[in-house]
Image (cartoon, grey):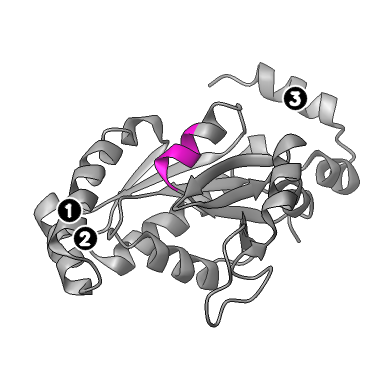
Amino acid sequence: MRLNKGRLYIISAPSGTGKTTLCRMLLKKVHRLKESVSYTTRQPREGEINDVHYTFVSIDTFREMLGGNEFLEHAEVHGNYYGTSMSRIEGILSEGFDVLMDIDVQGARQIRGKNIIASYIFIVPPALDILEQRLNKRSTDSSDTIQKRLNKAKDEIKELFSYDYVIMNEDLHKALEDLIAIITSNRLRTEYLDPQWMARTFAVQEAQFRVYKSDTPC
């Protein structure tokens, strides 16, 4: 039985920090946690499934959604558009699930500017030279691209103080434990209790609950 409302978790990190791997592990470990599926205008890649990896739409459909203020955040990357549907997020949260959003600092900044209630988590590497080693180990980028990623990482890391939590990914399993701890602690906070659950289970109405909390000394 779930006694708290769903919560949105925003996770950002420089490229090569291990964010995507951590998010995949987190989704397997934590129950009632769903990943946000973004809309995109790009073509599906081999193995990608619609509404699982992305929701693939035409440019006209995307622009129509954009004009209707459907997106919580959106961006253009290499000529393709990406966006997160607010109604989709709200639908998942209303079902009592937490939502995980793996987005860059620009997307997080857009969401923060809309005063959306969320927990913001930033993942950092132990050091820039270690990040460089990881990027080189992937063997997917040229030396110029790696240098651009490192320069971008320096700018992104400057924004970590606008996040609620920071996790150092020196050890993958330790970083995963830290992520799980954040979600677990939030789920135990009284401020996130579901008022409907309180009323149904203990006959405590939301107004009474809020009065009690305001009178409780810190």
The answer to which image quadrant residue 53 occupies is bottom right
Q: Amino acid at mark 3?
A: Arg
- Say which residue label 2 marks: 170
Segment colored magenta: 104-109
Mark 1 or 3 closer to N-term?
Answer: 1
Mark 3 vs mark 2, CA separation in Å: 41 Å
Question: Is label 1 in contact with label 3 (beta carbons under 8 Å)?
Answer: no
Location of residue 146 in the rendering, given as x and y in whole percent from the top left corner? 18, 58
Up/down of 55 relative to 65, above or below: below
Camera-side residue of 117 and 108: 108
Location of residue 79 in the rendering, given as x and y in whole percent from the top left corner? 49, 52
Crowding at label 1, few (<14), some or many (≥20) Cα neighbours within 10 Å?
A: some
Mark 2, secondary structure of its residue: loop
181 vs 45, left or right, is left
Residue 4 visible somewhere in the drawing:
no
Mark 3 or 2 closer to N-term?
Answer: 2
- Say which residue label 1 marks: 126
Residue 106 visible somewhere in the drawing:
yes
Question: Is label 2 in contact with label 1 (beta carbons under 8 Å)?
Answer: yes
